[in-house]
Image (cartoon, grey):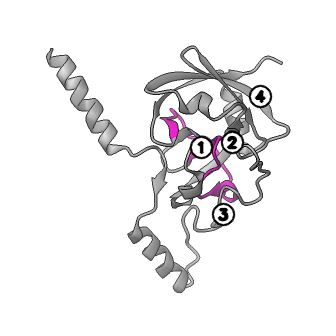
């Protein structure tokens, strides 16, 4: 009984402390950023150097809101196993995605939050500074550089630019509800899809 109560308390603390994997830039960080820009400083942190949004330069579809917004024509097909549910995806050709492909098969523990499934990777993935952006498009598979998060984002793209440190590595290749209907936490196995 005592273990159950402790487990519940720990779960509540973890849930309360995490509002999802995406990180919001605080007003102090924004003010600091503006102050540094006004002083002409050369030292800038991630995301302040490029100010890109997830939609910048992205090939997108907007006709079907039930499908991912981002479109990736060519890429590496993967399957992500959430228990008995398979969520197919396509990884792009970024340095970050290619590093993940080299690690496959890979398992990451992921939890569901309001707009994503997210888990902390054991080791950080490499990334190029120019690939770091704010926000996401629904259906994106991202690596968040501020805490080594592997995340699959399925809602709230319209208000997502408040979250920084994102690197897009791919997109799910199925209706958004295939992942948004899932609840709880999973040890998600990611592997190359057989073609």
Q: Alpha-carbon neighbours of circle 3 within 10 Å: few (<14), some, or many (≥20)?
A: some
What's the CA distance linking mark 2 and mark 4?
Answer: 12 Å
Sequence-earlier tag: 3 or 4:
3
Q: Is residue 77 left or right of residue 74?
A: left
Badge nearest the viewer, 1 or 4: 4
Q: Note whether 52 is above or below 17 in the view shown.
A: below
The percent position of residue 143, horizontal first and vertical second, equals 59, 43
What's the CA distance linking mark 1 and mark 4?
Answer: 17 Å
Sequence-earlier tag: 3 or 2:
3
Q: Which residue is mark 2?
A: 169
Q: Alpha-carbon neighbours of circle 2 within 10 Å: few (<14), some, or many (≥20)?
A: many
Quadrant of the image containing the N terminus = top left
Helix, strand or loop at disc 2? strand
Determine the residue located farthest toward the left in the rendered image: 2
Report the magenta residues as a range: 116-144
What's the CA distance linking mark 3 and mark 2?
Answer: 15 Å
Q: Which residue is mark 3?
A: 52
Q: Which residue is located at x 24 percent, y 24 percent?
A: 7
Q: Residues at badges 2 and 4 in contact (C-beta under 8 Å)?
A: no
Q: Which residue is located at x 51 percent, y 27 percent?
A: 182
Q: Quadrant of residue 103?
A: top right
Q: Quadrant of residue 152?
A: top right
Q: Which residue is mark 4?
A: 77
The percent position of residue 177, horizontal first and vertical second, equals 60, 32
Q: Residues at badges 2 and 1 in contact (C-beta under 8 Å)?
A: yes
Q: Which residue is mark 1?
A: 143
Q: Is residue 8 left or right of residue 157?
A: left
What's the CA distance linking mark 2 and mark 1?
Answer: 7 Å
Q: Which residue is located at x 33 percent, y 38 percent?
A: 15
Q: Nearer the viewer, residue 191 or 186?
A: 186
Residue 137 included in the magenta stretch of the image: yes
């Amino acid at each position: 009984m005592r273990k159950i109560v402790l487990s519940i308390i720990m779960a509540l603390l973890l849930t309360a402390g995490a509002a999802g994997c995406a990180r919001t830039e605080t007003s102090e960080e924004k003010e600091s950023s503006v102050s540094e820009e006004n002083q002409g400083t050369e030292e800038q942190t991630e995301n302040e150097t490029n100010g890109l949004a997830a939609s910048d330069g992205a090939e997108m579809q907007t006709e079907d809101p039930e499908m991912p917004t981002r479109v990736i024509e060519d890429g590496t097909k993967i399957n992500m196993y959430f228990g008995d549910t398979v969520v197919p995806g396509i990884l792009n050709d970024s340095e970050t995605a290619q590093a993940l492909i080299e690690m496959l098969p890979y398992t990451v523990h992921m939890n569901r939050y309001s707009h994503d499934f997210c888990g902390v990777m054991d080791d950080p993935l490499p990334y190029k500074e120019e690939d770091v952006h704010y926000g996401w498009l629904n259906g994106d598979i991202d690596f968040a550089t501020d805490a080594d998060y592997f995340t699959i984002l399925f809602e709230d793209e319209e208000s997502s630019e408040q979250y920084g440190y994102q690197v897009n590595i791919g997109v799910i290749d199925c209706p958004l509800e295939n992942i948004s209907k899932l609840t709880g936490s999973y040890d998600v196995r990611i592997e190359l899809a057989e073609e």
